Amino acid sequence: MKPIQVGLFGIGTVGSGTFEVLKRNQEEIQRRAGRPIQITMVADLDVARAKSIVGSTVQVVSDARQIIANPEIDIVVELIGGYGIAKQLVLEAIDAGKHVVTANKALLAVHGTEIFAAAHKKGVMVAFEAAVAGGIPIIKALREGLTANRIQWLAGIINGTTNFILSEMRDKGLAFDDVLKQAQALGYAEADPTFDIEGVDAAHKATIMSAIAFGVPVQFDKAYVEGITQLESQDIRYAEQLGYRIKLLGISKRTELGIELRVHPCLVPAKRLIANVEGAMNAVMVQADAVGTTLYYGKGAGSEPTASAVIADLVDITRLHTVDPLNRVPHLAFQPDAMSDLPVLSMEQVVTSYYLRLRVADQAGVLAKVTGILATANISIDAVLQREAGEGESHTDLIILTHDCPEAKMNQAMAEMQQLSTVLAPITRIRKEELN
Ligand code: HSE
């Protein structure tokens, strides 16, 4: 049978992994897909390097538009990244009737609505398993495996760089900057690591998962995004003493008022499986009404793990491209005319629990004043830890864990506590999720 023909836009880490795995597992993949899948064209600015990867049987060009113009190409794989030229080329490929596979989380989180609408109009598929959590088939699970369920929430470690940094800081007591350099050397970090450490990469992925889980449009601009750059190693230690680990989580929850969509560091009970996901590994927990809690774990980045997701999409498209577009799995799991308009909530509306660290004067009545403010705000305390003041020290650290309360209420209480003359430094606040 005639092979389905694929053109790659870009052959870096993921592209070369895709070429290699397709070649290595060709026979098995064909048995699954029903026909051969062949990369027949590659576009890359570094033509010589691309040729050294794919050899002489594949046509290498420097201009991706040559792939779009080739009527023999059925599917394009966009591995350029970002939302500049990548967006332009994806829209042009759709317009030319090509199916698209992309690993570009930023593009879909920001411009997904426009791209999916264009694909829907043209009757082509845009597949993006590789955009979220690399090799973990989380898109497939949310969109198809859990399709019977009303999904209630999801929470994921979806950025390997930050998880690696947090693990190394906790395990080895290393400083943030030193571990970031290691993460870059190991190739986990994005070209601009700001996207990793400031939580933007995780927010792109959380935005995409949230859209599929709840049938809402992708709305990256409404996500709350906080990274790990302000995190101090003393908080990692205090959290541990209290039975928690600090993880950068991407969270999306359905509430009566709307959808929570947020990325921030979070205390998670050390006994949860997800709290024990270490190094550059990813994991996503999903709570749904029929199945209960499920957990998906694996490599969230890297050449062959990401290639695994890209090829899964190529196989899906190969199986489905002759199917009437109306009978295919919708891009965002829900039919385009059945999307929900539930609003994304502001952070002030989010309800969660908190870890607070206050640097306080070691004097009589300080604890009473602090807890008095929380009591007046009707914020219930779950646990308190006070560091014994060191020899000659006139201050100490007061750590408070609270039960759930709206963030607006916590903001107000923190502002009042900050006014106390016995609170000597800006209060540290880290959110806490029990995930039960
Ligand atoms: N920079 C990303 C990470 C790569 O650290 O997880 C995968 O998207």
Image: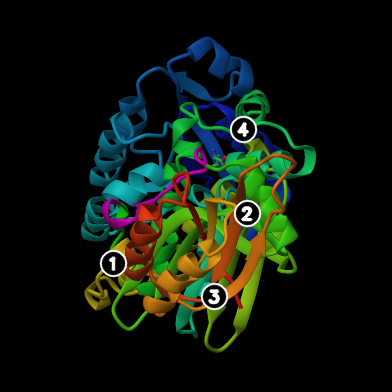
Direction from residue 134 to residue 374 in the image, left or right: left
User: Image point 72% across, 56% down: which residue?
Assistant: 240
In this figure, which residue is indicated by the disc labeled 4? 176
- What is the spatial separation of the Cα atoms under label 4 and label 2, in whole angstroms? 14 Å
Q: Give the secondary structure at mark 4.
A: helix
In this figure, which residue is indicated by the disc labeled 3? 381
Rendered position, 70 above or below 273: above
Callout in the foreground (4, 3): 3
Residue 151 is situated, as x and y percent measured from the top left of the image, at 47, 79
In this figure, which residue is indicated by the disc labeled 2? 246
- What is the spatial separation of the Cα atoms under label 4 and label 3, in whole angstroms? 30 Å
- What is the spatial separation of the Cα atoms under label 3 and label 1, in whole angstroms? 28 Å
In this figure, which residue is indicated by the disc labeled 1? 344
Q: Give the secondary structure at mark 2.
A: strand
Could you tell which of marks 2 and 1 lies nearer the N-terminus?
Answer: 2
Is the magenta region chiefly helix, strand or loop?
Answer: loop
